[in-house]
Amino acid sequence: MSLNYLTPEFKVIRDYDKCINCKVCMRQCANEVHSYDEDLGKMVADDYKCVNCQRCVVMCPTHALTIVKHPQVFRENANWTYDAIRDIYRQAETGGVLLSAMGNDRPYPIYWDKMVINASQVTNPSIDPLREPMELKIFIGRKPDKIELDENLNVKTKMPPQLTLNYPIMFSAMSYGSISYNAHASLARAAKELGIYYNTGEGGLHKDFRKYGPNTIVQVASGRFGVDREYLKTAAAVEIKIGQGAKPGIGGHLPGEKVSEDISETRMIPVGSDAISPAPHHDIYSIEDLSQLIYSLKEATDYKKPVGVKIAAVNNVAAIASGIARAGADYIAIDGFRGGTGAAPKRIRDNVGIPIEFAIASVDSRLRSEGIRHTISLIAAGSIRSSADIIKAIALGADAVYIGSAALIALGCHMCQQCYTGKCNWGIATQDPNLVKRLNPEIGYKRLINLITAWGHEIQEMLGGMGINDIESLKGNRLMLRGIGMTQKELDVLGILAAGE
Ligand code: SF4
Ligand code: SF4
């Protein structure tokens, strides 16, 4: 066997003054980092296996463990970085495509952090959200060209189907298969209690979750997993998945070993068979084809449900969005290049696509300039980290946002980026029954509710500070943003002024 050139990425430091040899860390680690050395009479760790998921650190009853970046270094080299060299070793060893998970972690600029939010002072005074009503409700779907009222001032106009959200936030598409049953159970129940929506992703709808149908968006992706009339009818909305931010332009692959009895039934594929989503939909090669699928899905759901389209943020996203609006979609979800995933080729995840900040701003501008902005709702996705990011996304033109990684972090994810291995020690990105049960959906759904209500309070405070009492009034209101440390071109694409202007 050839020599393994890879050195460990992390170092497990155990404080032997605190360690009581309880072996909790050994039982908790699916990567088998910890073991008890009978000869030494103490616990030891294999640093090579550690992925820094921090499960052992959190579970250790005496707080004896710390995980640090491994101090072993290469000679300093600005070009041949540690990661670049490691990746070559890995590929020279395996001959395979490098896989990774969660979002793009490269140090590209984060434009959310280069924008600041306005606040009222003296004139147009701020509003105190504790004393005055502050509306966060949002409606997703096509809006009519004009509203007609009858003599009693009731709305006469027949409204296209809408989703009603109590917060401008939804849980992004994450399939059963990429995440666990208990993770889905937590998301579904939280969505119902909050009056928002979660999204099945492309893995079908588990029979146990049909009861959450009124708060469920179901996906129709290129693999058509789990899609039948009942699936479409159970949901509140249907989303055609064309692309996702973590891997624009390519399909997906759930390895056969992860396709258990339960997943096979939900996806409607044989147990143990690979679930491969082709890169394109084999019936969509033009906007006209997309339009046919949109109207087929509307027909199948009696024109009672919004039909949306999810795409990755790429060059020319504004023109693509304009085509999607004209194809008859009710909403478009745009997923930026930091969007998370259970598994993606690392090179694609880290190098393909554009930031969501630019995509939303350019799509909103284009649709407004074409006079069709009201015909479609915009959902921003791809690494929304806080309530401030949401305010900024809406001021740039989004109606609402999707959160995926943030929701998983609320459930306990520690961002080890190893979801594709199926060994998530937090019970989230795994189908191993012993790991799945570590995530208690009774606790999980409450943590999600806490996160969204906390963000709701913060959004109300920021809106009040701007003197705005309705989230709808912030939509596309770019005067409420200013840029810091950006070039004029970047400011122009975002359509905002520099701080001080
Ligand atoms: S969990 Fe903590 S106390 Fe228990 S064996 Fe591991 S390091 Fe020692
Ligand atoms: S979901 Fe689990 S495996 Fe994936 S990054 Fe989070 S902790 Fe790691």
Image (tube, grey):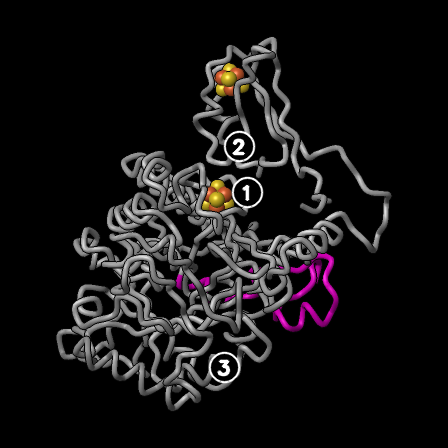
Q: Is residue 461 left or right of residue 432?
A: right
Q: Can residue 470 be seen by looking at this rendering?
A: no
Q: Nearer the viewer, residue 497 or 58?
A: 58
Percent across and percent down for residue 59 are 46, 24
**Circle 2 sits on which residue?**
54
- For badge 3, the amino acid type reads Ile
Percent across and percent down for residue 265 are 23, 59
Percent across and percent down for residue 466 are 51, 53
State whether label 3 is within 8 Å of ligand 2.
Answer: no
Label 3 crowd (10 A; few <14 / some 14-19 / many >=20): some
The residue depicted at 71 percent of the width and 72 percent of the height is 489
The residue depicted at 36 percent of the width and 51 percent of the height is 134
Q: Residue 15 falls in which quadrant of the image?
A: top right
Label located before the other in sequence (3 or 2) = 2
**Circle 3 sits on which residue?**
320
Element type at marker 2?
A: loop
Q: Is residue 87 magenta?
A: no
Q: What segment carries the magenta color?
A: 472-501
**Location of residue 163 with respect to 299 vertically, above or below:** above
The label nearer to you, 1 versus 3, is: 1
The CA distance from mark 3 to mark 2 is 41 Å
**Location of residue 45 with respect to 278 vertically, above or below:** above
